[in-house]
Image (tube, rainbow, N blue to C red):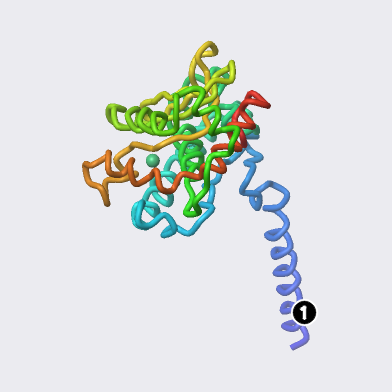
Amino acid sequence: MFVQRIKFYRNIQYYVILSIVAAVAPALYGGQNNKKNETVGTMEYVLEDLEYPKNALEPYIDEETVRLHHDKHQAAYVAKLNDALKSQPSFSYSGPLDALLSDLDMVPEPIRTAVRNNGGGVWNHAFYWRSLSPSKSEPSPVFAKAIDKNFGNFENFKKLMLSSALNQFGSGYAWLCVTRDGALKICSTQNQDNPLMFDADSKMIPIFCIDVWEHSYYLKYRNLRADYLEALWNIVNWGRVSERYDYAVAKKRVMP
Ligand SMILES: [Fe+2]
């Protein structure tokens, strides 16, 4: 009886020690830290939450489209970006994604295309969602003046922006950007490219974008991209775009 009791207490001791080791080990080796992977020394990017409920853009963008677009498509870009970075443990980077995309030459060649496509997919989508809002807002007086100066008037700007989005062949984006000399310029890009990736001479600072991949509109609008674009105009976050304009002109870089 006495011997059995000693064995029992020894087992308890082992159990307590094992429990302590199990609890402390992940903290020591970074297993509890989901923002930074200590093994590769590179940021592990996370899926950014939307600023509004997924049904908040109704009726212009339906809830199911937002769910699929954000929870599946955008999430897949995040996972593939992290996979690519993890596959090159010698590459260490912990800065913002926009700076990485602005200087893709720093990325090891074997994963450069994956980082370009999936990193672009992560950044562009976050930028797109933050360009939209269920709350109505107007361009600031300063931004409105810049629109008039660069495009004649707001209606003409809208026409040119929608035309760029409509005529983007295949998947891509239409962008409103600030150039190096502070002018506003519209352009479009293919796939998940963005104006941060342009050559040094033509690089621009994005302040607004429209996703024209079919996954952004096909469930509700089918093949009618023009209808999606016209509807999207009702939910542009002009307050945010105006802030981005001010930031780009003052700081010469994209607003975080
Ligand atoms: Fe998209």
Q: Quarter of the image containing the C terminus?
A: top right
Q: How many marks?
A: 1
Q: Quarter of the image containing the N terminus?
A: bottom right
Q: Residue at x 28, y 27 (%)?
A: 169
Q: Nearer the viewer, residue 178 or 20?
A: 178
Q: Is residue 74 left or right of residue 247?
A: left
Compared with residue 86, is residue 132 higher up or lower down, i.e. above or below?
below
Q: Residue furthest left?
A: 223
Compared with residue 233, is residue 17 higher up or lower down, i.e. above or below?
below
Q: Is residue 1 left or right of residue 140?
A: right
| Mark 1 Cβ and ligand 1 under 8 Å apart | no
Q: Residue at x 31, y 27 (%)?
A: 168
Point out residue 130 in the picture as x, y percentages from the top left corner. Answer: 52, 44
Q: Residue at x 76, y 71 (%)?
A: 13
Point out residue 248 in the picture as x, y percentages from the top left corner. Answer: 61, 28
Point out residue 175 in the picture as x, y percentages from the top left corner. Answer: 44, 29
Residue named by callout 1: 6
Mark 1 residue element: helix
Point out residue 235 in the picture as x, y percentages from the top left corner. Answer: 43, 48
Q: Residue furthest bottom?
A: 1
Amino acid bearing label 1: Ile
Q: Nearer the viewer, residue 91 or 79?
A: 79
Q: Residue furthest top?
A: 201
Q: Is residue 3 left or right of residue 149?
A: right
Q: Residues within 10 Å of mark 1 (few under 14, many from 20)?
A: few
Q: Nearer the viewer, residue 67 or 44?
A: 67
Q: Nearer the viewer, residue 19 or 3?
A: 19
Ligand 1 sits in which quadrant?
Answer: top left
Compared with residue 61, is residue 121 higher up or lower down, i.e. above or below?
above
